[in-house]
Amino acid sequence: MKPVLVALFFLSWAAAAQTAASPDTPLVSHPVVSELSGVFGDVTDGISAVTAAGDVFVLLLGPDNGQVTKLAGDPASGSARIGKVSAAGNVTFVLQLGGVSLVRTMVAGADGNVFVAGNATASGLPVTAGAYRTTSGGDQTPFVCKLSGTDGTPRFCTYLDDNLMQLAALGTDAAGNSYVVARRNQSPVAATPGAVSLGSRNVLAMKLDAAGSHLLFAAEFGGSFLDLALIGRILVDSGGNIYIGGSTDSPDLPGGAASPLPGPSTIKSQNIHASPFVTKLNSSGTAVIYTVYGRPTEDLETFAVSSLGEVHTLSLQAGGDPLFVQAVRKYTADGTGVAYEKPLPIDEDPITEDPIRRIAVDGQGVAHIAGSTTLIAFPVHNSTGSCPAPGEANPYLVRLSPAGDLLQTTYLASVGSASVFDIGLQPGAGFIAASMGTGLGAVGVIRIEPAAGDTAVTALGCYGNGATFQGGALAPGEIFSIFGEGLGPDSPVTAVLDGKQALGGLLGGVQVTFDGTPAPLVYTQGAQINAVAPFGLGGKPASRMCVSFGGRNSCTNVTLSAAAPGIFQYLASDGRFYAAARNAGTSVNGPANPAHPGQIVELYTTGLGPLSPAPADGAIIQPPLPNLVSQVTATSPGPGLVPIPPVPIRVVFAGPAPFQPAGVYQVNVEIPQVTSNGTVPLELTLMVQTPDGATFRTKAFVAVHP
């Protein structure tokens, strides 16, 4: 998923409602303000913060649209704009902060103010009187500012010691103290007397007082190799204990001897197999309480800490089946055990998507994971929300009990394309707040709360292309997938595909209809159905789709289009989705079995549009083959990183796949000449132009060796 640099949602949940509801009660989302167009320019993903009152702060990009309400410092050498949207959806202020080259992070304080940290230019920062460091240590010196939540006025702004440290994370506590974590690099900052100073001292943690004028402590620690290699995070619990998370190549971080998972055993190039870690320091920075490691096959995306001091990590794990799995791991409060490890029912494309996910833990120990995906493979559970608009990013919420049991997976109410940028939960505040992109220059607001007793739980999730799992309009004859809960039998039932027997409209007790017309069924199971859209839908803009099973009907309105192409794909060991293709009609294409220039590769697709004459629904295609009405062309950006200009690819054949069910299409392409030293992934784009001039695209990789 490409980053959505647009706008914000936040989610709020009333404290009174939370304390009265059981964790088992599903949450329901309501839009409060759907859209405030043109207020902001673009916003940057991930750089946002939320307060206990539900206010949202965000870093703004793009043109200012004349919205700046306050200027602080000198913007001549660089500046950043920070905006605030109130819980009611009103723009409170837009501050232009001078002397800034880059804002890396921000965090909301308990008093409703916001802390901002990043890199400063050599001059221009509005350093306040009595600041910890009033002079710059050179261009790109890290800085910290505390801004008023009322109008953005700097409460304090201070440089840090020098420009050699690499800022990684920012945190705050209930007293308004600020915490900075950085990779030391060659910075000469030394540990303060009595503070932790252990190992290689790669990681530097600094605590500033609430006025930003005094360094309360500087602690340092590290292992044998590279630590804090990825952007880290710092959290402070109610007791003032400090949690620092990141990625490390070191098997010997201080406090890690009792970790329930071992650290990395050897250093790996480019940190690809480094282990995540979370290190806990005491409130004075004088002792490491423990270090817990993650697995070398996972990337730590973020973490949260419960009111009992239990660390919850959210990670993307690689090397399993499926290849990439999102998972939440809860460690015991003493850091010596794993309370649970739970894979999440969320599917994403690890190459073309760049999702941002956040985790928060409420006062009852329930973990909340918010994120978004463009893929439709999201089995809902106790869902109170419907699938967002087809083709848009789908925002979701997952809730896990203190024991790791799945309480709920649901889509969230949204407007347009929405990517979760941040989610925060203030201990004791009783609400969740998250920022989401919704549309260019727009601000959206949603509230989530425990569902009332009469709230309907939705069985249907999303629907979309059965080859790519991308949501969108359906085309006549397209193989599509539906995801949900309780849609079919517990054990999967697959239709007989022998090249002779037609597909029927009833499978495993499941029937799918469009305006009453049954759709041929390929696969049925409670969480997923694969079917073929009837050819008779051609020319209609929409249809009513219903799923019937066990005496229950689940219906939704679906959008239709003349074509909705998708290339059947599989996820290979290199993390890319390769086309389900055959080299010269024989072997399966892939990194271990590439095609060669001049060779014909058969791609298997669906959704290419109507056939003439139209086959019977569910029929097995036999020669003579019907003709494809649409025109299919193909291009490739080549194996390099610069896709200009695209390389035309010769299409040898495009039409229905012989001896396959109607709905399976075949496109044969000739592999072009490539220049490389070995096997490369060549991205192919198929373009389908329908008779009315509309163009639809789909893409996948094929493996090629010169």
Image (tube, rainbow, N blue to C red):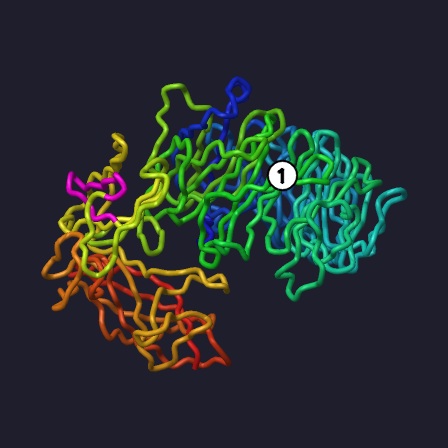
**In the rendered structure, which segment of residues is drawn in magenta?**
507-521
Coordinates of residue 669 in the picture (x, y in percent): 29, 74
Count of numbered labels shown in the rendering: 1
Quadrant for residue 32, please give it.
top left
Of residues 299 and 352, the one nearer the viewer is 299
Q: Would residue 593 appear left or right of 161 to someone viewing this image?
A: left
Quadrant for residue 499, please give it.
bottom left
Quadrant for residue 559, please give it.
top left
Picture layout, residue 695 above or below residue 111: below
Q: Residue at x 58, y 35 (%)?
A: 360
Q: Check disc 1 and report its element: helix, strand or loop.
A: strand
Coordinates of residue 605 in the picture (x, y in percent): 28, 61
**Would residue 125 be seen by someone viewing this image from the given angle?**
no
Q: Quadrant of the C terminus?
A: bottom left
Q: Residue at x 50, y 29 (%)?
A: 12
Is 36 contained in the magenta span? no
Q: Would residue 590 appear left or right of 263 to someone viewing this image?
A: left
Q: Residue at x 22, y 72 (%)?
A: 653
Of residues 623 and 630, the one nearer the viewer is 623
Residue at numbered disc 1: 330
Q: Would residue 160 appear left or right of 463 to someone viewing this image?
A: right
Coordinates of residue 664 in the picture (x, y in percent): 24, 60
Please state which amino acid type lies under the numbered disc 1.
Answer: Lys
